[in-house]
Image (cartoon, grey):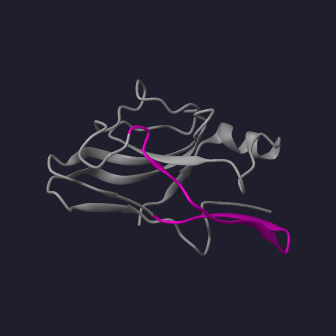
Amino acid sequence: MAAFNKVNAYIEKVWEKAYDHGADTFKVALSNTAPSSASTIWNTTNFPAPAAANGYTAGGNTLTISSSSQSGGTYKWVLADSTFTATAGGIGPFRYAIIYHSVTGEIVGYYDYGSSITLSNAGDSFTVDFDPTTGVIQAS
């Protein structure tokens, strides 16, 4: 499982109540271009994504929020896994799964899988595996 890399500017937005992590819509997009901790806005110019074809939807997959709550003073944001499945023609290459706010494009963070991945055959799939125990973001 790849480690989550948060975007520094996004943390400020969280504390300043810019987003509702229990109700807003977030997406995960694939790219072969690395974000950085200073990257703030997702777009296909800065982070070219696979073509919107062959099982990949323009802008990536819409994420499902499993939970957004606090317990004992620690807030945890948990997302359901998201799977990309190739049809004829395949998807890729990509190395990064970038989580962003679907309206503003603000990048939450990204996962780096260490090397480029290509789903070359129909039926090949790739799952962004979000940790259900620790969540994507924790704050206390």
Location of the N terminus (image quadrant): bottom left
Is residue 61 found left or right of 23 in the rendered image? left
How many circles with numbers are drawn on the protein?
0
In the shown orientation, is residue 15 left or right of residue 1?
right
- Residue 40, quarter of the rendered image: top right
Quadrant assignment for the C terminus: bottom right
Q: Residue at x 51, y 65 (%)?
A: 130
Q: Is residue 91 left or right of residue 68?
A: left
Front one among 68 and 96: 68
Give the vertical position of 134 relative to 30 (above or below): below
Query: Image point 60% across, 42% down: which residue?
Result: 7
Residue 124: image location, x then y, percent: 21, 61
Which residue is the extreme one toward the right? 73
Q: Which residues are magenta?
A: 58-81
- Residue nearest the observer in this picture, 118 or 5: 118
> Residue visible at 72% across and 57% down?
22
Q: Is residue 136 left or right of residue 123?
A: right
Q: Does the segment drawn in magenta span residue 78?
A: yes
Overall secondary structure of the magenta section: strand
* Residue 15 covered by magenta stretch: no
- Placement of 116 over or under 128, stated as above or below: above
Residue at 74 percent of width and 40 percent of height: 13
- Seen in the picture, residue 16 relative to 79 is either above or below; the reply is above
Outermost residue, top side: 45
Q: Whole-percent x and y of residue 65?
A: 62, 61
Q: Nearer the viewer, residue 22 or 106?
A: 22
